């Protein structure tokens, strides 16, 4: 506790957290809501936090409110804050109530956190605000959340996660938009007076609004410069705003988007904040470590390889499920290297298209007279595991479920449909109990170790309780079936966030299997999502969503960057294509443990047609590099590619993993071949000058590997 007086206010409470090479410092002015006065580089132990707090306050000019009030973790209108508030309350008559909390207690929250408890000055017995902060020692991520308890009959129409001040000099706002089959489209804007606003009103995370933002300086790149990123761990509708006030101050807020009025105790989801002075890759590394940490309990429950090669039958047969045909396809997939066979949409009663049967989760005896067991037994005989598709939150009007329980449908009867389907009311415990019973019966009576969980339409109404109901149902199934892997699929990438990833250990990044689209979106998704969590499949020769025809080497190597799988009819492959796919799959199996434990670095290629990244192990002894060529470059020769994460003093032996896939036309004479004996290069050279790769044609991939050949000796 410290106190510093100025003519207008006193610094009454100070607290700092020091973990993971970061400092988070908080200060309360006049016992009001605390402010985050610093998050970033570790401050000196003897730094005067009180003086630092005062130094964050600008001088007050004419025409402004006196005394001046700082940006707090929950900025409020009562203080004179002119920007977007962090909380909006209504009294029992529906009128906005200007809460004015006073700090009552500051307490340690575990070994690495702090909790601030505040009571409203006028309604101390009815309104309590609790703000929690934790600084993770392993990742350096700051986790912020808050909850408010309000009086009976009162309501809350907005509660943000704690607000963030934008650090000085971070002039760029970077986030991701997208669409179905075109997720994770990077966009950037600058600050201006007013708010940069992003909202998802789909009732799910959404294809167009990944709940994350990165602030960066004008010079920040992949490897250098300062940046700060934040993401909301929430799987429903949300709002993000990055706001600049006329006085020049800037804030970032995230919160649940709720068109209704919450009552009782309302809690914000956790906001995960990462700071880096090592470029955009620095914040990505923090999020990858965080994701691996929350996934560790999921993987620990499974005494097996958690990332098998998938085969999904959707783009081979769609709704046409014939037992003998599926057996044939499973055998061919196993011969190509698949390790899990996933039966997609079409296996349940009456499901011959997308117009009927959603909600009737019973095996279709016309397609499978003896149930799924004969197919599962055959799949197992081929050395494959078995997975199954569900879309639990949806219903068709033409279904036994809807005819029996029309009130289970969410929203009015005259609402529009989407893909011939409607949404079930997941806030209704009867609906969740019904769905749990049906899904549990299938999983309990069959040897199934994977569920693809789909969600193929946005909502036309509903509250955050819909997303909470989904999480409860999924959580109950995870608890009941700890050996089952769950994938979050929502017509592709419509539900990807750090909330659902506490329960699901894979996401279907997009319904697009177009390798050119995947090359870009995988690269951008890696800013948040670790590579092993991103499902990526080798699609058909003729892509069903884009119409492109792409080569099998390119399709295979793009999938090999992430959690690899196949999703095509293997009967279409020529012998040469089959051999290529087996070769790439075999390589991926031998290297997946390395790819999914090392550090991923996105590389700066100086060519917008090249998407390059490399994975380096903890000792910088080995790396694997992927360089995808999307289109034709402006220049004739491929530019040297500067690497990252290596030991400058070490020498590395460089080899080309896929020489078979290099274009002889683009490389009529190979002068600087990566697999030549003389290619033993220093880490310093590779990071400063780069490696000159073989020239590449559009829609191709170059894969390289490097191993340390020297190590500096140290004295004992």
Image (cartoon, helix red, strand yellow):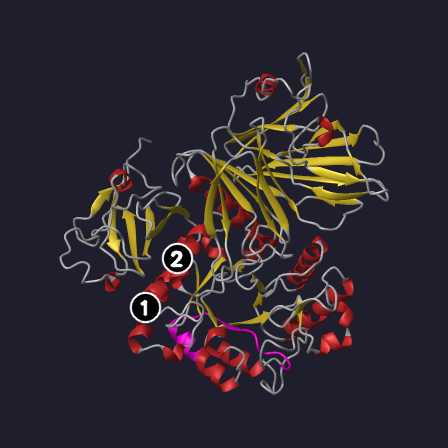
Q: Give the range drawn in magenta.
A: 331-350
Disc 1, SS: loop
Of residues 287 and 68, the one drawn nearer to the viewer in this rendering: 68
Q: Is any part of residue 149 visible from this angle? A: no
Q: Name the residue under label 1.
A: 551
Q: Does the magenta stretch include residue 338?
A: yes
Q: Is residue 99 magenta?
A: no
Q: Residues within 10 Å of mark 2 (few under 14, many from 20)?
A: many
**On-image quarter of the C terminus:** top left
Disc 2, SS: helix
Task: Tell me the CA gap for discs 2 and 1.
Answer: 14 Å
**On-image quarter of the N terminus:** top right
For residue 576, side relative to residue 422 (left or right): left
Of residues 101 and 99, the one drawn nearer to the viewer in this rendering: 99
Q: In this view, does 365 lie above or below 222?
A: below
Looking at marks 2 and 1 on the same chain, the residue that comes earlier in the sequence is marked by 2
For residue 272, side relative to residue 404 (left or right): left
Q: Is any part of residue 517 visible from this angle? A: yes
Q: Position of residue 314 (x, y in %)?
A: 50, 74
Q: Is residue 116 above or below residue 313?
A: above
- Tell me what residue is drawn at x 24 percent, y 48 percent: 653
Which disc, if any, is residue 519?
2
Q: Where is residue 255 in the image (x, y as percent from the top left)?
A: 65, 44
Q: Position of residue 462 (x, y in %)?
A: 71, 58
- Tell me what residue is drawn at x 52 percent, y 82 percent: 320
Q: Residues within 10 Å of mark 1 (few under 14, many from 20)?
A: some
């Amino acid at each position: 506790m410290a106190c510093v007086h100025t003519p207008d206010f006193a610094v009454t409470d100070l607290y700092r957290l020091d973990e993971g090479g970061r400092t988070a410092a908080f200060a309360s002015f006049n016992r009001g809501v605390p402010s985050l006065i610093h998050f970033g580089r570790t401050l000196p132990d003897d730094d005067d936090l009180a003086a630092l707090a005062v130094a964050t306050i600008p001088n007050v000019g004419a025409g402004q409110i006196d005394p001046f009030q700082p940006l707090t973790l929950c900025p409020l209108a009562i203080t004179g804050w002119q920007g977007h508030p962090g909380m909006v309350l209504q009294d029992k008559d529906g009128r906005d109530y200007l809460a004015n909390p006073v700090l009552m207690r500051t307490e340690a929250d575990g070994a690495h956190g702090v909790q601030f408890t505040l009571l409203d000055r006028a309604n101390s017995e009815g309104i309590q605000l609790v703000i929690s902060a934790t600084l993770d020692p392993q990742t350096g991520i700051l986790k912020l959340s808050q909850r408010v308890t309000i009086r009976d009959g009162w309501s809350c129409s907005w509660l943000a996660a704690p607000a963030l001040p934008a650090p000085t000099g971070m002039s760029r706002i970077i986030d991701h938009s997208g669409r179905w089959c075109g997720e994770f489209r990077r966009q950037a804007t600058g600050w201006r007076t007013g708010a940069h606003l992003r909202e998802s009103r789909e009732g799910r995370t959404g294809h167009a609004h990944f709940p994350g933002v990165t602030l960066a300086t004008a010079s920040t790149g992949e490897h250098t410069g300062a940046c700060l990123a934040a993401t909301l761990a929430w799987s429903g509708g949300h709002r993000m705003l990055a706001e600049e006030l006329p006085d020049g101050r800037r804030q970032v807020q995230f919160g649940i988007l709720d068109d209704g009025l919450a009552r009782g105790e309302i809690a914000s989801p956790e906001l995960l904040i990462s700071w880096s002075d090592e470029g955009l890759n620095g914040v990505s590394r923090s999020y990858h470590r965080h994701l691996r940490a929350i996934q560790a309990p999921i993987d620990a429950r499974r005494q097996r390889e958690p990332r098998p090669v998938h085969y999904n039958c959707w783009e081979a047969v769609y709704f046409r499920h014939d037992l003998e045909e599926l057996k044939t396809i499973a055998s061919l997939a196993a011969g190509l290297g698949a390790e899990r066979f996933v039966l997609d949409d079409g296996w349940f009663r009456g499901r011959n298209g997308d117009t009927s049967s959603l909600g009737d989760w019973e095996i279709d005896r016309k397609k499978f007279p003896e149930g799924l067991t004969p197919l599962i037994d055959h799949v197992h005989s081929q050395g494959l595991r078995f997975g199954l598709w569900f879309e639990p939150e949806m219903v068709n009007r033409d279904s036994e479920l809807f005819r029996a329980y029309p009130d289970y449908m969410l929203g009015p009867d005259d609402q529009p449909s989407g893909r011939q389907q409607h949404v079930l009311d997941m806030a209704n415990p009867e609906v969740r109990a019904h769905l749990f019973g049906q899904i549990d019966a299938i999983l309990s009576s069959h040897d199934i170790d994977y569920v693809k969980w789909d969600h193929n339409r946005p909502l036309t109404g509903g509250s955050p309780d819909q997303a909470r109901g989904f999480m409860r149902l999924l959580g109950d199934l995870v608890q009941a079936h700890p050996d089952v892997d769950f994938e979050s699929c929502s017509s592709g990438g419509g539900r990807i966030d750090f909330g659902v990833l506490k329960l699901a250990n894979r996401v279907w990044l997009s319904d697009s299997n177009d390798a050119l689209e995947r090359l870009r979106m995988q690269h951008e998704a890696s800013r948040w999502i670790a590579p092993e969590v991103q499902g990526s499949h080798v699609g058909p020769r003729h892509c069903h969503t884009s119409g492109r025809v792409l080569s099998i080497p390119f399709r295979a190597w793009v999938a090999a960057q992430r959690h690899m799988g196949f999703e095509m009819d293997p009967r279409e492959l020529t012998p040469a294509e089959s051999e290529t796919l087996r070769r790439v799959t075999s390589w991926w199996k031998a290297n997946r443990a390395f790819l999914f434990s090392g550090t991923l670095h996105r590389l700066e290629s100086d060519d917008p047609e090249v998407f390059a990244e490399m994975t380096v192990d903890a000792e910088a002894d080995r790396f694997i590099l992927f360089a995808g060529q999307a289109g034709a470059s402006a220049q004739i020769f491929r530019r040297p590619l500067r690497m990252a994460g290596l030991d400058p003093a070490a020498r590395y032996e460089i080899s080309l993993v896929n020489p078979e896939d290099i274009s002889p036309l683009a490389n009529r004479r190979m002068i600087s071949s990566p697999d030549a004996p003389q290619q033993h290069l220093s880490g310093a050279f590779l990071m400063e000058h780069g490696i000159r790769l073989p020239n590449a044609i559009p829609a191709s991939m170059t894969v390289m590997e490097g191993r340390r050949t020297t190590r500096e000796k140290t004295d004992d």
